Image: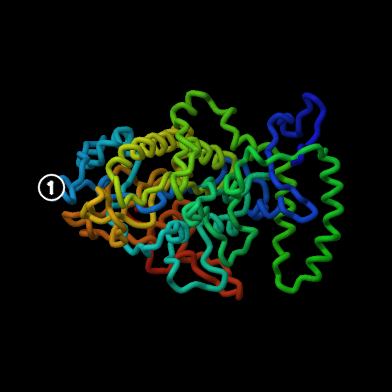
């Protein structure tokens, strides 16, 4: 481990003292291991708040839509389940009784009850790219929305990657996927501080900034030699990684965003902490990652992805819901309330969803099984029209009854909120062929942006 040395009480140029350093583990500048952690393209500086962003909350495993925000009180008991609907502050909209905080501020949310077209796999790919993993793939694969934003818009702040993933490394690794760069390449991958063992393990020891600069100068001729010798193109992103490595090490902005000790204790308490214990083979139930996401966006990030709990409830559906619904209710309402209080609600879009829904009929183990035919999504912020429900499902919650919404339509809407026309904007694949972010038939959802 390495620590940047400094005189006692000495601060960096932006005022951060040695006690507040960002800690980076496994540094080996000669082998460029630190640069490989930092995978977002550099860009000219803008004010941290002078940008739009998206926070994506992935509910790994497929949340039970008919027990959350689409209750079927008139259905038979084997479909209806154990929970009752409650009214909200928007007349006519009812949700599960275990989301009382959301009910009080439903005017700040929109529910899509008729998501269709799920691929059916236990992964986050469709929620991160808008495309089915088993569908046609260009060489290198489709990039996630965070990688696209990194490519199109770059950084807003030196030392803060455009694209960050807060999920830990899970036993079922796809459930901790922050989003892959696909054909855009590794320089647009997510910076994921928790997938390598935790930010507390990331330390630089006993090396001054001057020595770090000397090593940087020494590294350059070796990089040039390797780049000249490389015929595969794999070295092209190294300069980007290296520049950002030194940017992070000599800036406190990312460190401060991840350090909740600098936040107002009342706000920290509003979000809650949750638990950092992994949920079986899925993510943890950390509530403070919702706060980290807001702080990262405020610091300059364009896209932050995170995973919350494990929702593959083939058994004990209602027991687990009683544990997880109130936590999700607290975390998501704290985030949206905080965005509104800070005037960030017009610029920051929030989406909450999973890879598919659950079966209408409760099984013998009091669980619900996989159900790709229909699922749900929750949106907030982004300057969208909220306080509404989009679409409906059949009496048993098994299929879309009205206004089916496809995953690419949601992505078109998110890009629209980010100021990007996804049906006209392209990024080049590995062969140089321009690829549209969303195909032309998938317009932004008019109920949200009209």
When asked about the image quadrant of residue 253, the answer is top right
How many numbered circles does the render carry? 1
Left or right of 81 on screen, residue 65: right
From the top left corner, tell me how far across and down residue 283 is, in percent.
47, 46
From the top left corner, tell me how far across and down residue 86 is, in percent.
22, 36
272 and 148: which is toward the camera: 272
The residue at the point 29 percent across, 40 percent down is 319
Residue 382 visible in this rendered orientation of the protein: no
Return the residue found at the far front.
365
Q: What kind of element bears circle 1?
A: loop
Q: How is the image coloured?
A: rainbow
From the top left corner, tell me how far across and down residue 223 is, in percent.
80, 61
Residue 193 visible in this rendered orientation of the protein: yes
374 and 363: which is toward the camera: 363
The residue at the point 36 percent across, 37 percent down is 329
Left or right of 199 on screen, residue 4: right
The residue at the point 50 percent across, 38 percent down is 276
**Quarter of the image where the N terminus is located:** top right
From the top left corner, tell me how far across and down residue 267 is, in percent.
48, 27
Mark 1: few/some/many CA within 10 Å (<14, 14-19, 20+): few
The residue at the point 26 percent across, 35 percent down is 89
Q: Is residue 361 above or below residue 9?
A: below
Q: Where does label 1 land, which residue?
A: 74
């Amino acid at each position: 481990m390495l620590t940047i040395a400094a005189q006692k009480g000495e601060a960096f140029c932006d005022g951060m003292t040695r006690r507040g350093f960002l800690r980076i583990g496994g540094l080996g500048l000669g082998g460029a291991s630190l640069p490989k952690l930092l995978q977002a393209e550099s860009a000219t500086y803008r004010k941290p708040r002078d940008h739009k962003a998206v926070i994506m909350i992935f509910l790994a495993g497929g949340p039970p839509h008919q027990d959350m925000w689409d209750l079927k009180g008139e259905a038979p008991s084997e479909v209806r389940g154990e929970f009752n609907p409650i009214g909200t502050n928007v007349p006519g909209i009812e949700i599960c009784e275990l989301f009382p905080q959301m009910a009080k501020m439903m005017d700040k949310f929109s529910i899509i009850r008729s998501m269709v077209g799920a691929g059916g796999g236990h992964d986050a790919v469709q929620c991160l790219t808008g495309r089915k993993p088993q569908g046609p793939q260009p060489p290198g694969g489709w990039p996630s929305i965070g990688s696209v934003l990194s490519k199109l818009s770059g950084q807003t702040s030196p030392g803060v990657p455009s694209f960050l993933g807060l999920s830990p490394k899970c036993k079922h690794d796809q459930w901790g996927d922050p989003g892959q760069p696909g054909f855009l390449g590794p320089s647009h991958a997510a910076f994921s501080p928790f997938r390598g063992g935790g930010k507390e393990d990331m330390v630089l020891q006993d090396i001054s900034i001057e020595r770090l600069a000397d090593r940087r100068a020494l590294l350059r001729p070796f990089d040039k030699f390797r780049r000249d010798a490389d015929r595969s193109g794999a070295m092209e992103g190294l300069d980007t990684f290296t520049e950002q490595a030194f940017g992070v090490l000599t800036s406190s902005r990312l460190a401060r965003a991840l350090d909740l000790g600098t936040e107002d204790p009342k706000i920290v308490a509003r979000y809650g902490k949750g638990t950092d214990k992994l949920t079986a083979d899925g993510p943890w139930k950390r509530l403070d990652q919702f706060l980290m996401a807001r702080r990262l966006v405020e610091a300059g990030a364009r896209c932050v992805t995170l995973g919350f709990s494990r929702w593959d409830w083939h058994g004990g559906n209602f027991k687990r819901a009683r544990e997880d619904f109130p936590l999700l209710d607290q975390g998501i309402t704290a985030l949206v309330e905080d965005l509104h209080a800070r005037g960030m609600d017009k610029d920051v879009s929030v989406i909450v969803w999973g890879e598919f829904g659950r079966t209408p009929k409760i099984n013998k183990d009091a669980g619900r099984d996989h159900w790709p035919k229909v699922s749900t999504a929750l949106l907030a912020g982004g300057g969208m029209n909220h306080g509404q429900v989009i679409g409906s499902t059949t009496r048993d919650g098994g299929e879309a009854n009205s206004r089916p919404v496809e995953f690419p339509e949601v992505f078109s809407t998110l890009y629209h909120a980010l100021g990007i026309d996804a049906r006209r904007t392209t990024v080049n694949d590995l062969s140089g062929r321009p690829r549209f972010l969303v195909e032309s038939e998938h317009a932004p959802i008019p109920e949200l942006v009209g």
